[in-house]
Image (cartoon, rainbow, N blue to C red):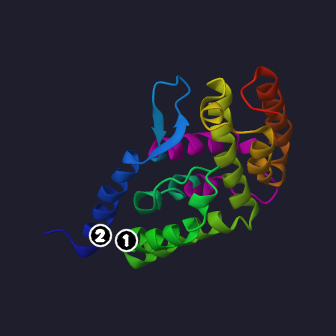
């Protein structure tokens, strides 16, 4: 019989497979289907590796990778809240806190605390690391919408002002990437992917 610690770790690993079932609004770049939250988290981790040179001073890229890998685990219980759904955000924080308590609580205490600290730091966005990780979380769907000729933006009639508001944290979280973000937004308006 395996020990209790291993049983808890395996239970957590099995549980987080459910993140693959949580569909986001964003489609894959080939527009064949909506991406799931597990794919999104993997994509962010790869972005952190590839774009590490754009992390701000004081940012810890390895820690940011850990944060983006776990940041959406709470969606197993709380679901994915579309970033432009104002009503859905009313109770999002409470739903996600409850989910974090349950999901991280499946782990042995020391690991649970470590992962919960990473998640809490990401949510608070009070460190350069968390702001970098959160910036990647904003940029990834921007890239998808840009590459799918407006994808979700067109479907939900999203305006330039809404995208600008959503992308603002990138200006301080990954300032070297901010000019690129502005370029993509302007190009998307010009191409008709976003309403002016």
> Where residue 51 sits in the image (x, y, percent)?
70, 40
Residue 55 lies in the magenta stretch:
yes
Q: Is residue 131 left or right of residue 32?
A: right
The residue nearer to you, when weighing 142 against 122, is 142
| The residue stretch that appears in magenta | 38-67
Query: Residue 107, which numbered label?
Result: 1
Q: Assess whether mark 1 and mark 2 are in contact (beta carbons under 8 angstroms).
A: yes
**Whether residue 187 can be seen here:** yes
Q: Residue at x 67, y 33 (%)?
A: 143
Q: Is residue 112 magenta?
A: no
Q: Is residue 118 above or below residue 62?
A: below
Q: Within 10 Å of the Cα at label 1, are there few (<14), some (14-19), or many (20+) other Cα atoms?
A: many
What residue appears at the point 73 percent right and 58 percent down from the top-left corner? 131
Local crowd size for mark 2, using a 10 Å CA cut-off: few (<14), some (14–19), many (≥20): some
Residue 187, placed above or below residue 88: above
Q: How many marks?
A: 2
Task: Tell me residue 15's x, y (percent).
Answer: 32, 59
Majority SS type along the magenta span: helix
Quarter of the picture holding the N terminus: bottom left
Q: Looking at the image, which residue is at 84% across and 36% down?
A: 182
Q: Nearer the viewer, residue 161 or 107?
A: 161
Q: Return the residue at label 2.
A: 8
Q: Is residue 35 above or below residue 20?
A: above
- Residue 98 drawn at (x, y percent): 46, 73
Q: Quadrant of the C terminus?
A: top right
Where residue 174 appears, x then y in whole percent?
79, 48
- The quarter of the displayed image where residue 49 is located: top right
Q: Is residue 54 visible?
A: no
């Amino acid at each position: 019989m395996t020990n209790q610690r291993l049983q808890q770790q395996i239970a957590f690993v099995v549980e987080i497979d459910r993140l693959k079932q949580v569909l986001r609004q964003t489609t894959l770049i080939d527009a064949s289907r909506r991406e799931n939250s597990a794919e999104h988290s993997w994509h962010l981790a790869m972005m952190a590796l590839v774009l590490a040179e754009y992390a701000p001073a004081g940012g810890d890229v390895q820690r940011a990778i850990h944060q983006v890998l776990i940041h959406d685990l709470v969606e197993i219980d709380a679901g994915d809240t579309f970033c432009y759904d104002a009503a859905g955000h009313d109770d999002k924080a409470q739903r996600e806190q409850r989910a974090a308590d349950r999901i991280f609580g499946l782990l042995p205490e020391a690991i649970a605390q470590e992962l919960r600290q990473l998640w809490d730091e990401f949510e608070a966005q009070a460190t350069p690391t968390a702001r970098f990780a959160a910036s990647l979380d904003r940029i990834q769907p921007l890239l998808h919408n840009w590459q799918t000729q407006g994808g979700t933006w067109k479907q939900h009639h999203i305006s330039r002002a809404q995208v600008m508001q959503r992308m603002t944290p990138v200006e301080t979280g990954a300032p070297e990437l901010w000019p690129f973000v502005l370029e993509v937004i302007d190009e998307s308006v010009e191409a008709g992917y976003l309403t002016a």
